[in-house]
């Protein structure tokens, strides 16, 4: 059910470390190639690549800002959806109080199971097989709750109960699909690969532009900041792994356990 590409499954820290070394390697390679050309032809030192490297750096900065904005927007959307789901489930639980104890008990028992499945769905993390299993289990339970509510509505003359519970239940069920789609929506791999390539080429041209010996403080500093930025972009874009997670908003769903305390 849940499939990840190589880019989506690769640990963010590993990707950042690879970019760090490739950036340094690109810079050193550019510097050495320029030095060889100058040794063969001293007039080659007069060639100025600063305008080209400056343009590439500007493009790199623009792409970094663009991808960071995309990942941050997706993170905010996922966080909001988790809170909306918690509110939707809470609303359904409260509205079961309109029903007689016989049907209310059945509904709340099923809802308690549903809440546990949704909690486990998130806590499965990068174990996608387990996450898929809990997603399916929650879907089965939601259908059971729907059948209970609809079945009682057909035999109940009080339409107020139905008009209160059914819309809330429909929202609770629908938002799981929306949340799943948001979780699977990440920055396209093609954009990320282009960002990596642009980073390496920009570093290469910076090294090619350097006529004197390499200043390692500048090179390492540039590589560290670039790889750290890429790390944060990837981390924001991963809803199930990394340092930036959904634990705080997901606690709102965990807190729903308190509603079954009675």
Image (tube, helix red, strand yellow):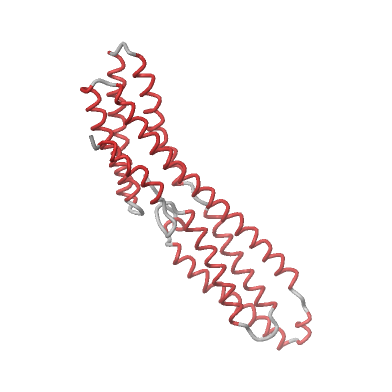
Is 111 on the left-hand or right-hand side of 223? left
Residue at 67% across, 61% down = 59
Residue 101 pos. (x, y %): 22, 23
On the image, the x and y values in percent for residue 185 come to 48, 46
- The relative height of residue 61 versus residue 33 in the rendered view (above or below) is above
Q: Nearer the viewer, residue 76 or 22?
A: 76
Is residue 103 shown above or below 60?
above
Q: Is residue 34 left or right of residue 238?
A: right
Residue at image point 37% right, 43% down: 252
Task: From this view, report whether residue 239 is shown above or below residue 42.
Answer: above
Depth check: 105 or 114 in front?
Answer: 105
Above or below, comparing residue 30 to residue 241 in the picture: below
x and y percentages locating residue 19 in the rendered image: 52, 69
Left or right: 246 as drawn, with respect to 229: left
Q: Is residue 239 left or right of residue 253?
A: right
Estimate the x, y position of residue 8 in percent, counting from the top left: 45, 55
């Amino acid at each position: 059910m849940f499939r990840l590409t190589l880019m989506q499954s690769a640990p963010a820290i590993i990707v950042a470390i690879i970019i760090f070394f490739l950036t340094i390697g690109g810079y050193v390679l550019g510097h050495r190639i320029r030095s060889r050309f100058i040794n063969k032809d001293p007039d080659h030192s007069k060639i100025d690549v600063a305008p080209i490297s400056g343009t590439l750096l500007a493009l790199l900065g623009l792409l970094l800002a663009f991808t960071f904005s995309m990942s941050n927007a997706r993170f905010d959307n996922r966080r909001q959806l988790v809170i909306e789901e918690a509110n939707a489930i809470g609303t359904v639980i409260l509205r079961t109080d309109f029903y007689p104890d016989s049907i209310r008990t059945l509904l709340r028992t099923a809802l308690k199971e549903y809440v546990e499945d949704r909690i486990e769905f998130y806590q499965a993390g990068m174990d996608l097989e387990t996450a898929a299993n809990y997603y399916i289990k929650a879907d089965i339970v939601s259908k059971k709750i729907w059948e209970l509510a609809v079945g009682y509505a057909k035999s109940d003359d009080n339409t107020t109960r139905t008009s209160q519970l059914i819309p809330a239940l429909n929202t609770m069920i629908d938002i799981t699909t929306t949340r799943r789609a948001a979780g699977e929506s990440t920055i396209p791999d093609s954009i990320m690969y282009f960002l990596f390539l642009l980073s390496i080429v920009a570093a290469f041209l910076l090294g090619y532009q350097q006529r004197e010996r390499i200043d390692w403080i500048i090179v390492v500093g540039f590589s560290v900041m670039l790889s750290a930025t890429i790390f944060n972009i990837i981390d924001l874009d991963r809803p199930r792994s990394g340092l930036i997670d959904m634990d705080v908003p997901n606690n709102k769903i965990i807190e729903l356990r308190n509603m079954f305390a009675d």
